[in-house]
Image (cartoon, rainbow, N blue to C red):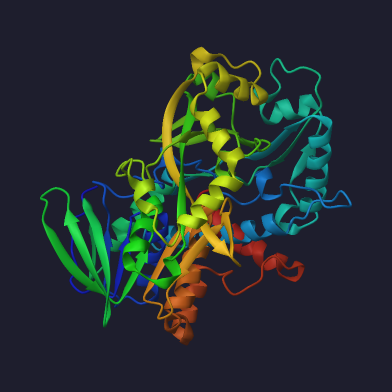
């Protein structure tokens, strides 16, 4: 796609063209059609960094299969389902808004960005089998997960995902399954929403335009922009700026000078996938299968064997494998990104993190020095009969794990998303990890509530939001609202062709 439109002195500037900016821009324009919105993207096309289909897991994260979202058992042996219930609810916001976008003609051909793929959790060994049993017990008691199946029977599991049991020995195994899982191409939904946004009055999208500076102005922000094709620089002024630039968000936050950015740091982790395109193997697997977390691995590195629909073709991916990098962005990053992000106000935090996370550093070094045989050993945990000749290694995206101070202590944000907003609510920025893109609609809705509350105060605004996201003002996780959720979910499912 070729985006080269400009809006002078817009109400809103969105930096980055990924799924966060796409959803925020579309929601804002539907809430207030008079808003002037400009999107700037450093790459030559939109959604080519973290949102690109090859650069992320493509899982519609709903807490169904991701064991890292319920990482431990309680003292009594039970598993607390509150976190996965929250994630499921937030993903429903995304499904409902995307379904609305299809129904309203904002986007077309939903199979190009979302497809039904069963979600499975898979474990081996007696301890983990018992954990999964308890996880299923606690989750299936809630109406979100009432259809979840559990089995320790190899024949049953083979029926769900035959590659898991082929040539497997007698070690105890267990799996859970829900058929309502999805595979999502976040790049494609972003492109569709942004194409619609650019077609609207007073909206522009400019690719190959990198933001080089942000300066607070009397009426918002002065933004310095460089056109990478011509080398020319220009400025624009916006009342509100959203920084949704993935790994590029931290440097821009630091340039902004806002107090909320002081002490923040970033730790980049590269990713790689094993990919199988052998049609005989690909056709035998129809599931996203998430396993147990590896020691010291960040949330994004929990292994999974996935059916993916990419570039209109079904394929099979396994991973991700982590890789050491100092770049913050996959396409437009520099090896100097990490060292240049070290400032006097975050140096102590970064040093403390390095000391406290030696296991993570060791893990990244080990991951970066793996051979193909080492990677196949991990794959064999899921697919014992896998042969190296059918798999190849490809690079994926880069995730910058946010580092922040909390109550004087430093910590890496392995899970969740941080939205940083300054006191006058003229700038918000996103730093975060999984489940990120899947719950993007919920995240940007929180930005709207904080920075554009007037859009939701009027009866007209409330009605528009209710039409777009019916569950936004209903606590659908409560038992008394189970029927409301079921009806709203059925509408979204039908609209999305699931």
Give the image location of residue 444, x and y in percent: 46, 66
Q: Residue furthest bottom?
A: 458
Is 24 on the left or on the right of 235, as rendered? right
Q: Nearer the viewer, residue 52 or 103?
A: 52
Q: How many numbered discs sit on the rendered protein?
A: 0
- Residue under the point 40% across and 51% down: 247
Q: Nearer the viewer, residue 190 or 359?
A: 359
Q: Is residue 317 visible?
A: no
| Residue in view at x 36 percent, y 77 percent | 32
Where residue 474 sits, quadrant-wise, is bottom right
Percent position (x, y) of residue 91? Answer: 57, 57
Q: Quadrant of residue 3?
A: bottom left
Q: Is residue 198 left or right of residue 250?
A: left
Q: Residue at x 75, y 71 (%)?
A: 480
Looking at the image, residue 110 lies above or below residue 40: above
- Whether 271 is drawn above or below 195: the answer is above
Residue 392 in the image: x percent, y percent? 45, 21
Q: Can residue 230 be seen here?
A: yes
Q: Furthest residue to the right? A: 76
Q: Position of residue 231 (x, y in %)?
A: 12, 51
Q: Quadrant of residue 307?
A: top right
Residue at image point 39% right, 47% down: 338
In front of the other: 427 or 493? 427
């Amino acid at each position: 796609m070729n985006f080269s439109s400009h809006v002078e002195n817009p109400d809103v500037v969105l930096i980055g063209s990924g799924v966060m900016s796409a959803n925020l821009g579309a929601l804002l324009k539907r809430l207030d059609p008079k808003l002037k919105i400009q999107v700037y993207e450093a790459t030559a096309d939109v959604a080519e960094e973290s949102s690109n289909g090859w650069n992320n897991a493509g899982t519609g994260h709903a807490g169904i299969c991701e064991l890292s979202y319920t990482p431990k058992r309680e003292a009594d042996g039970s598993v607390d389902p509150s976190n996965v219930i929250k994630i499921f609810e937030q993903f429903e916001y995304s499904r409902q808004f995307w379904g609305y976008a299809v129904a309203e003609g904002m986007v077309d051909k939903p199979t190009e960005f979302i497809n039904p793929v069963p979600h499975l959790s898979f474990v081996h060994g007696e301890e983990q089998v018992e954990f999964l049993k308890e996880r299923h017990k606690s989750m299936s008691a809630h109406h979100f997960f009432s259809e979840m199946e559990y089995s320790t029977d190899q024949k049953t599991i083979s029926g769900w995902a035959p590659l898991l049991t082929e040539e497997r020995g007698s070690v105890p195994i267990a799996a859970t399954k829900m058929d309502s899982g999805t595979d999502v191409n976040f790049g494609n939904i972003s492109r569709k929403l942004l194409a619609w946004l650019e077609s609207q009055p007073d909206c522009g999208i400019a690719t190959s335009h990198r933001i080089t500076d942000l300066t607070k102005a009397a009426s918002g922000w002065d933004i310095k922009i460089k056109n990478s094709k011509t080398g020319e620089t220009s400025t624009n002024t916006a009342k509100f700026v959203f920084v949704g630039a993935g790994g590029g968000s931290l440097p821009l936050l630091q340039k902004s000078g806002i107090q909320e950015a002081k002490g923040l740091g970033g730790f980049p982790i590269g990713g790689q996938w094993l990919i199988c395109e052998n049609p005989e193997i690909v056709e035998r697997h129809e599931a996203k299968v998430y396993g147990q977390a590896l020691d010291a691995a960040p949330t994004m590195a929990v292994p999974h064997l996935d059916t993916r629909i990419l570039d209109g073709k079904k394929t099979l991916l396994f991973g991700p494998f982590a890789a050491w990098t100092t770049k913050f962005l996959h396409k437009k990053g520099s090896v100097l990104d990490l060292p240049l992000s070290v400032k006097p106000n975050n140096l102590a935090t970064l040093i403390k993190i390095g000391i406290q996370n030696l296991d993570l550093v060791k893990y990244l070094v080990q991951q970066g020095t793996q051979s193909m045989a080492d990677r196949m050993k991990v794959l064999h945990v899921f697919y014992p009969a896998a042969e190296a000749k059918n798999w190849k290694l490809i690079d994926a995206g880069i995730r910058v794990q946010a580092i922040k101070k909390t109550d004087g202590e430093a910590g890496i944000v392995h899970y969740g998303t941080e939205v940083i907003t300054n006191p006058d609510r003229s700038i918000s920025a996103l730093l975060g990890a999984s489940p990120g893109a899947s719950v993007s609609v919920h995240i940007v809705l929180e930005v709207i509530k904080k920075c554009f509350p007037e859009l939701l105060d009027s009866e007209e605004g409330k009605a528009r939001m209710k039409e777009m996201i019916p569950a936004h003002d209903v606590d659908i996780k409560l038992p008394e609202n189970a029927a409301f959720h079921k009806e709203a979910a059925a509408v979204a499912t039908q609209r999305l062709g699931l």
